Amino acid sequence: MRIKKLSLGKGAQSAEGLAVIIDVFRAFSCEPLMFHYGARAVILEADVARCLAMRAGAVLVGERDGLPIPGFDLTNSPFLIIKKGRPFFHRRKIIHRTTSGVTGALAALERCDDVLLASFLTARATAEYVRQKAPRTVSIVAMGNRAVSKAPEDEFCADYIESLLTGKPYDHIEAVREIVRHETARKFLRGDKPYYPREDPLICLQRDLFDFTLRAERKRGLVRAVPVSHLG
């Protein structure tokens, strides 16, 4: 198995084989939580106008360049998802739009055999899926801040998944130390913007909370995030 470590939008566009698209803060930390609370489906859509056109009977969750989107029901926050809980998400269809994770997954899906959506919350399950499938090439893509600048949380998550696949050393304490010193975490920890809750990094940096990974699947013109815990 050849592992390619890539970053940002360009990395997603050049991924090959099986792609693991990482967005820790916050897209692919949000999606497993929504499934945990019983979401019926999560649709990945980058175009805001298309999201709004699909809102009938659906919940719109997302952000554009980190900011809440007018007309959406919820911004892209794990903490706010937890506050809403099961009554809000159970058996509902979610339309999810984000600047890094969702757009990166859609780009990778254009050229890759398989696309997984990963964060620390699903890292071990993601690595197990990759191990079972044993592709010739794995492209691990750290999407970073707005897909244009590297973010330590995504780079370290890529390191963690690589360590699970290869046995390469990984120190999560050191990772957390570096992540919380960086602006991608500090903008939450300052607590001065309601759409960047202080609690989000605390949730996103938890490892292996879920026993499933998420796979992007195209069907009837839409791309869905589908929970998978094993091949088949």
Image (cartoon, helix red, strand yellow):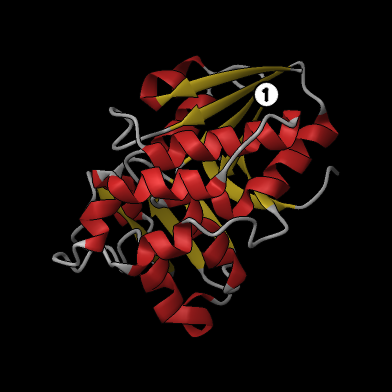
Q: Is residue 60 visible?
A: no
Q: Quadrant of residue 121?
A: bottom right
Q: Quadrant of residue 134?
A: top right
What's the residue at 46%, 26% (across, down)?
A: 107
What's the residue at 65%, 33% (across, down)?
A: 169
Q: Is residue 45 visible?
A: yes
Is 224 on the left-hand or right-hand side of 210?
left
Front position in the image: 175 or 229: 175
Quarter of the picture holding the N terminus: top right
Return the x and y of residue 66 as percentages of the image width and height. 24, 49
Tell me the kind of residue under disc 1. Asp
Quarter of the picture holding the C terminus: top right
Return the x and y of residue 60 as percentages of the image width and height. 36, 62
Which residue reaches farthest bottom? Answer: 87
Which residue reaches farthest left? Answer: 192
Return the x and y of residue 131 as percentages of the image width and height. 80, 33
Is 196 on the left-hand or right-hand side of 91?
left
Q: Quadrant of residue 71?
A: bottom left
Front position in the image: 4 or 212: 4
Is 114 on the left-hand or right-hand side of 109?
right
What crowding class fits label 1: few (fewer than 14 Cα within 10 Å), some (14-19), or many (20 or more)? some
* Secondary structure found at label 1: loop
Q: Is residue 174 above or below residue 14?
A: below
* Disc 1: which residue: 113
Return the x and y of residue 57 as percentages of the image width and height. 43, 70
Is 180 on the left-hand or right-hand side of 108?
left
The number of callouts visible is 1
What's the residue at 38%, 56% (across, down)?
A: 54
What's the residue at 41%, 80% (across, down)?
A: 84
Q: In this view, does 1 lie above or below 115?
A: above
